[in-house]
Amino acid sequence: MAIEHLAPSATAADVAGALARDGAVVVDHLVAPSVMDRVRDELAPWLDATPFGPDDFAGRRTRRTGGLAGRSATCRDLIMHQLVLDTTRTVLQHATSFQLHLTQVIAIGPESPAQQIHRDQWAFDFFPFPKGYEVQCNTIWAMTDFTAANGATRVVPGSNHFEDRRQFTEADTEPAEMAKGSVLLYTGSVYHGGGANRSRETRYGLNITYNLSWLRQEENQYLAVPLDVARTLPVDLLRLMGYARGAYALGYVDDLRDPMEVVRPDLADSGLGDNGLGDLERAREQLVG
C-alpha cells in the first residue's frame, strides 16, 4: 500500500481521515523550501555541535538536535502550524487536551543503516494502549528532499490497525519520499523507522510531535527551553509546551496556581490554568462521561 500524498490545500479533516485509515500521510509542499533553509541557518551552531547517537536505535551515524522551541523562531512557527494543530486536535479529540511532545532535527548521515521498525507510542514503557486509541500525532518536515536512497522515513501503511509488538523488515515498508518543504504526518501507533542512507549526503528531517496532555513528554520542554527564553514566547506556544493543565487538574503549581503564573507572573490567574479549551466544565464532563 502506497503512502497517500495530499495537496497543501488539504483540510484537517482530509489529513485526519488519511491518518485514521493508514496511520500516515504526506502533505506536499506545505511550506516553501526557503523556510527549511531558514531553520537550518538558525540551528547551525547546535546542529554542528550535536554528537552522533549512542546506540543503534538512535543511530550511530545520526545526529538528533533538540530544544528547538527555544533555539529557532522558525521552528516555533512550524510547531504552531495551523493545519498540523487542527489535524492533531481531530486525531486526539477523545482527550481534553494535547501538548508538545518532542522537537528534534534528525540528521541521518551517509552509510547509516535502517532504523528498527517501531511504534513511537512504545516510548510509554510499552504500555498496551487499546487498539484505535491514539495518544500521539507526529510530523516530520523534509528539510532536504526525502528519497528511498537517502534515508526517507519508512512506514507500514495501515499498521495502525495491527496488533502490538509486531516485527517488520525494510521489505514490508514504503518510503515517505517527499520534496523539501513537505511534511509526513503519522500517528503513534503506525509502524515506521528511519531509512538507510545509501547516498553521499545527509538527510535532514524536522521531527515535531504532540501527545495527550496526561502523558509525560518525551522531551522535557521546561528544561529544554530556558526560563528566560520561555518568558519571551507567545502564550499559546507556552500552553502547548505544557504550561497549562492536562485534563482537569494535572500540572498545577503548589496552591492550585496556574503554571503560566510561574513563567509569566503578569498573567496570574486565580484558576488552575487554561487547558486549551478555555472551559473547566467541559473537562469535568469528560471526567464523568
Image: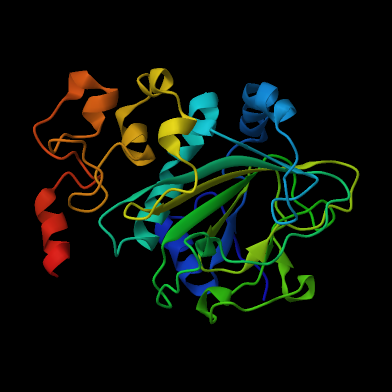
Tell me if 77 is positioned left or right of 63 in this view: left
Where residue 187 appears, x then y in whole percent? 50, 62
Q: Give the image location of residue 210, x and y in percent.
A: 44, 50
In this view, the residue in front, 136 or 58, is: 58
Q: Identify the residue at horizontal 49%, vertical 26% (top origin).
A: 70
Residue at point 49%, 43% (across, down): 219
Residue 117, x across and y down, in percent = 68, 67
Task: Say above or below: 106 vs 166.
Answer: above
The number of numbered badges drawn on the structure is 0
The foreground one among 19 and 273 is: 273
Q: Residue at x 68, y 39 (%)?
A: 143
- Quadrant of the snapshot with the N terminus: bottom right
Q: How is the image coloured?
A: rainbow
Nearer the observer, 110 or 143:
110
Q: Quadrant of residue 256?
A: top left
Please, is residue 120 above or below residue 44 in the view? below
Q: What percent of the width, then of the height, locates residue 112?
A: 83, 51
* Image quarter (top left, top right, bottom left or bottom right) of the C terminus: bottom left
Q: Quadrant of residue 170?
A: bottom right
Q: Residue at x 44, y 63 (%)?
A: 16
User: As drawn, is 280 to the left or to the right of 76?
Assistant: left
**Image quarter for residue 267?**
top left
> Eyeballing the image, is 81 above or below 281?
above
Q: Say which of 253 and 27 sits in front.
A: 253
